[in-house]
Amino acid sequence: MLKQIKLITLLLLTGLIAHAQTIDVSIGNKKQTVEQWLSELKVKSGVSMTYNAQLADLSIEVELTEQTAPVEQIIERLLNNTNLTFTQRNGKIIIYQKEKEKDDNAVTLSGYIKDESTGESLIGATLILKTNDDQGKNLTGVAANAYGFYSITVPTGNYSLIYSYIGYESQVYNQELTNSIKKDIALLATSTQLDEIVIQATTEDPLHHIYSPDIGVSSLDISEIVKMPALLGEVDVIKSIQTLPGVKIAGEGSTNFFVRGGSADQNLILLDEAPVYNASHLMGFLSVFNPDAINQVQFYRSGMPARYGGRLSSLLDVRMKEGNKKQFQASGGVGLTASRLTLEGPIEKETRSFIVSARRTYADLFLKFSSDEFTRKSSIYFYDLNAKLNWRLSDKDKVYLSGYFGRDLNKFLTLQYVIDWGNATGTLRWNHLFNDRMFSNTTLLYSNYDYAIDLSNEGDQFNWNSQIQDYSLKSDFTYYLNPKNQISFGLSSTLHQFNPGYKKGFENQGVPNIKAFEHGIYVGNEQSLSERLSLEYGLRYSMYQLIGPSTSLSFDANYQLTSEAKQSGVYKTYGGLEPRIMARYLVTPTSSVKVSYNRNRQYMQLLSNLSLGLNVFDIWFPSTAHTKPQTSDLYSLGFFKDVNSNTYELSAEAYYKSMTRQVDYKNHAQLIMNRYLEGELRFGKGRAYGVELSAGKKTGKITGWFTYSYSRSERRIQGLNNGKYYPTNFDQPHTISSGASYDLSNRWSVATTFTYATGRPITLPIESYRYDGQIVPVYGDLNSNRLPDYHRLDLTFTLNPKDRGRRRNESYWTFGLYNVYDRHNAATAFVSAELEDIDVIKNKDKSAYQKLYLFGIIPSITYNFNIK
C-alpha cells in the first residue's frame, strides 16, 4: 500500500507522457553519484526521468563498467545496491525509495513459569529480555498471568532471557531467537537451593513496582505471610492485609477491613475467582483462608483492572495451590486451638495433580470432659476444606476444578442460642491457548453463604435464616499484541439469589426473596508509550437486572410503604460505564510517579447495625427499585522509589474518593424480622481522602516495613445528623503499622508487628433526663465520641530444623505472643444500667462508660511439618 501511494504521488507531480521505446545506451567506466548517472542517461537516451529528491537519496556514488545496453538494464544495475528502485509508467521512468519490507522476522517467545519442586504456576513471575549487542541495552519484558503463562513478541536476534520471581533464584539464558518457540521455565525457591546448582541472579527487573503502572496494588507472598505473628497461632491472610497502608480494622480480632474510606461490604473477596461473602471464623476472629492451601494473594486498593467489578473499594484475589505435580507431599500443623493437614501430589506426573487441605478447631472436644452438664452439651468449632484437581489435556488446554467448604457452629445451651454459618464455593476453569499470543480462560462459578440463628426456648420459637447464592459464567481473553501492548477483553454473567432473612415457619414475616442478573463486559490494554511513560487503561460496562417472580416494595419520600406488588420477568434495570486508567512516568531508573482514576458500581450492600464487627445478624441486600446502586470515583497519585539496588522501597500515595447512594440506618432501625426493612434505610453521599507513606527493607538478615496513613472517611445521609457530614464508624485519622523479621541464627528467627490507630468513632449520651421514673439518655451528633486509641505488639519465634532446605522431611516450631504488653483495647463502650445517673452523664464523667475489651495477652505454640 505504501508503495502504491508513493507511485501515485510521483505521477501526480510529473504528469503523464507517452510510452517510451527500448533504447540502447553506451556508458564509460567511471564512478559518480546516482543523480549524475541519471542525468547522463537522460541526455543519451532522450527518455524522460523523474524523481523526488526528498523521497529518494541520489547522492550515493556508484561505479559502473563500460558497456552498451538498454537504458532500463543500466538503471537496474545502477540502483542494484541502493535503497532505490524504479518503474516505467506512461513512457516515463520514475525513481523512488524502496518500501521498507514488513517485519516478517518478528518471533514470539511464550510458555509457563513454574516452581521447580512442585510444578505450581508462579503468578506474576517476570521475563526480561536484554539484547546481546555491544551496548547490551534495549530491555523489554512481560509478567506471567494468573495461570503462569507469558508471551512476548520481539524481532529476531540474540538475547539474554532473565526469568525471576520473589523468593526464587533468577535464571538467565542466552538465546538466539530465529523462530517462535515455547519455553517452559522452572524456578528454584531460594530456601531449597542446592550447592551443585549454579544459577545467575539479577536485580534488573523493569516490571517491579517502580516500572509497572499499577498503583495501590500489593502482591503478598504466602511464605512471608506465614512468618508474621498471628492470633492463637493461626496464620491469617486477612490479618496480613490489615497491616497495609490505607486499610483499617473494625476492632480487636475482627476480619472486617475498610479500605480508603469504604465500608467492609465494598471489598470484593475472591477465592479461585468465586466470591466469598463472609470470610470470617469464630465471630470474625479468624479468616476462612487456610494458608496451607493458598498459592498467591493479590490485593488492589486502587487501580483495579477493568476485568473486575461489583465493589467500590478493593479487591482481594486469593488463588489456591494446584497441587504438587512431581511428588507426593504432606504438610500441616498442630496448635493449641486448631490443627490442619494438607495432602497433595501427582495423579499422573506432570499431567494431573490434586491437593486436599483441611483445618479444624477442637475446643468442643475438651468441653465434653467438663463436669458441668450444660458445658458438655455446648459446642464451638469451625472447619475448612479446600480441594483442587487439575489436568493438562494438551499443550494448549488445561482444566482446573476447585472447591472450598467451611462451617462454624456456636452452641451454648446455658445461653439458649445456636449460631451456624458457612461458605461453599466451586470453580471449574478451562485455560486454552489459541496460539502463542492469544490466551483465554473460561470459568463456571458457584458461591453460597448462609447462616441460621436459633434462640428458641420452651416458651418461644425463634429460628432466623439468611442466604445468598451465585451462579456465574465468565470468559477472559488476553492478546499479547507486541511488547508495547497487552490487550485484555471479556464478559461475564451472574445470577444472584438473595434470601435476606426469614423466621422459620413464618416466611411471611421475612424479607422477600430477590433474584437478579449482573452482567459485565470489558476491554483493556497495558501499553508502553515510551521508556518513561506507560499506561494501563480500560472500559467496563456493567448491567444489573431484577427478575421475577418477586415482590417489589415502594416507599414515599417519608419512607412509608405505599405499595407491595408481584413482579415477573425483568422489571428493573440499572447499568453504566466504568472507566479505569493508570499511568506511570519514570522520573529516574529507580523512581516513578503514578496516577490513576477508577469508577466502580456496586449492586448490593451488607446491612448490619452491630458495632463490634462480629458478622452476626448481617444481611446481604441487593439493589431494588427503591434502593439504587452505589457508585464511586477514586483519584490516586503516588511516588515510588527504590534505594540501593532494590534493598529499600519507599512510596507515598494520596487519594480522594467520592461516593453516591451510601447506606446508613435511621435511628433505632429494626433489621431483623422486618419485612419492610428498606424503609429503615437512609441514603446519601460519602467522601474519603488521605495520604499513605510506606518504607520497607527487602533483603538482608533484618527485613521489615513501616507504614503511616492519615485518612478521613465521612458520610452525609438524608435525615441523619441534621444533614451534616459525620465520621463513619471506621474513620481513624492516624494509623501506624510496622514489622520486622530477624534471623537470630541458622535455626532461630523472630518476627514482630506493631499496630497503632486512632480510636474508632462511637455515639455516646451527652445528657439525660427522667421520664416516668426512667433515665432517658440524649445523644448528640453521630459518632462525635471516640474509643481510646488502639495499639498492640505481637511477637513470634520460629525454630527451624537443622540443615534447613536440604532435608526431605522438615518440621519447625512457632512460639507466639499476641498483645505482648497486655493492652486492653476497647471494642466498644456503653453506659451500664448501674451507671445511668443524670449527674454523671451531664458532667461527662468518662468513668461512667463501660468499655468492653476482648483479648489480653495470648500465648500460642504450633508444631508445623512438611513430609515429601
Image (spheres, grey):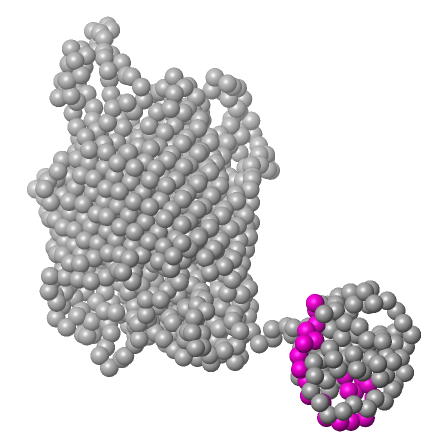
Q: Is residue 373 magenta?
A: no
Quadrant occupied by the N terminus: bottom right
Quarter of the image for residue 642 reads: bottom left
Q: Is residue 424 above or below residue 437?
A: above
Residue 186 location (% of width, % of height): 36, 73
Residue 57 is inside the magenta segment: yes
Residue found at x 36% / y 19%? 721
**Residue lying at the far right of the rendered structure:** 18
Relative to the observer, which residue lies in front, 346 or 744?
744
For the question of whether residue 287 can be seen, the reply is no
- Residue 788 picture quarter: top left
Considering the image in quadrants, where does the C terminus appear?
bottom left
Residue 834 in the figure: left or right of residue 557:
left
Between residue 537 and residue 519, name the one nearer to us: 537
Is 75 situated above or below 649?
below
Q: Which residue lies at the image location 57% right of the left edge and 32% below the top edge? A: 567
User: Is residue 351 rendered to the left or right of residue 791?
Assistant: right
On the image, the x and y values in percent for residue 172 come to 36, 75
Q: Nearer the viewer, residue 353 or 140?
A: 140
| 484 on left or right of 670 | right
Would you say residue 15 is visible in this rendering? yes
Question: Residue 320: x, y in percent?
Answer: 35, 59
In front of the other: 768 or 362:
768
Position of residue 718 relative to residue 611, above or below, is above
Span highlighted in magenta in the image = 54-75
